[in-house]
Image: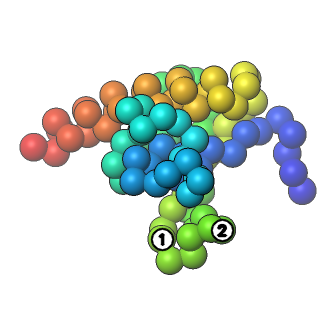
Amino acid sequence: MKDYEKQVIWLDYFNSSYSRSQGRRVSRNRSIKNPVLSDLLEAAKRLNLNPVGHEVIHPKRSSVNSGYISIDKKNKKTNVLQDLAKMLTIVKGESKKSSK
């Protein structure tokens, strides 16, 4: 049953290798290459969105592992996506630095 108090945010919304028609929801300069669910969870935690991660396959791409987070509905989805995109680039940059 649909929970109207939550929003679903797919990883594919932030993948720079996808076009808008393939499911990307943020501009290409705000998107990142190969987003990871753990980074998206961390970005949502930093924005105090109370995320819950789910590793599942996106319905459009059954051959690609993906995932989504469900967050508390606090704002319009487009505004939340823009905030998450900004934070996701920061988190992705930090994870690259720590892996070196």
Look at the numbered disc 1 and give the secondary structure of its residue.
Answer: loop
Image spot of residue 34 (x, y percent)? 36, 53
- Say whether residue 95 is left or right of residue 98: right
**Camera sees residue 82:** yes
The answer to whether 51 is drawn above or below residue 11 in the figure is above
Marks counted in the figure total: 2
Badge 1 amino acid = Val
- Residue at the outermost bottom position: 63
Q: Quadrant of residue 80?
A: top right
- Residue at the outermost right position: 1
The answer to whether 80 is drawn above or below residue 57 in the figure is above
Q: Residue at x 51, y 62 (%)?
A: 66
Badge 2 amino acid = Pro
| Labelled disc at residue 64 | 1
Q: Are marks 2 and 1 in contact (CB under 8 Å)?
A: no
- Say whether residue 98 is left or right of residue 74: left
Q: Residue at x 33, y 28 (%)?
A: 90
The answer to whether 88 is drawn above or below residue 23 in the figure is above
Label 2 vs 1, first from the N-terminus: 2
Where's the N terminus, which quadrant?
bottom right
Image spot of residue 27 (x, y percent)? 48, 34
| Residue on which the image places disc 2 | 59
Image spot of residue 20 (x, y percent)? 55, 48
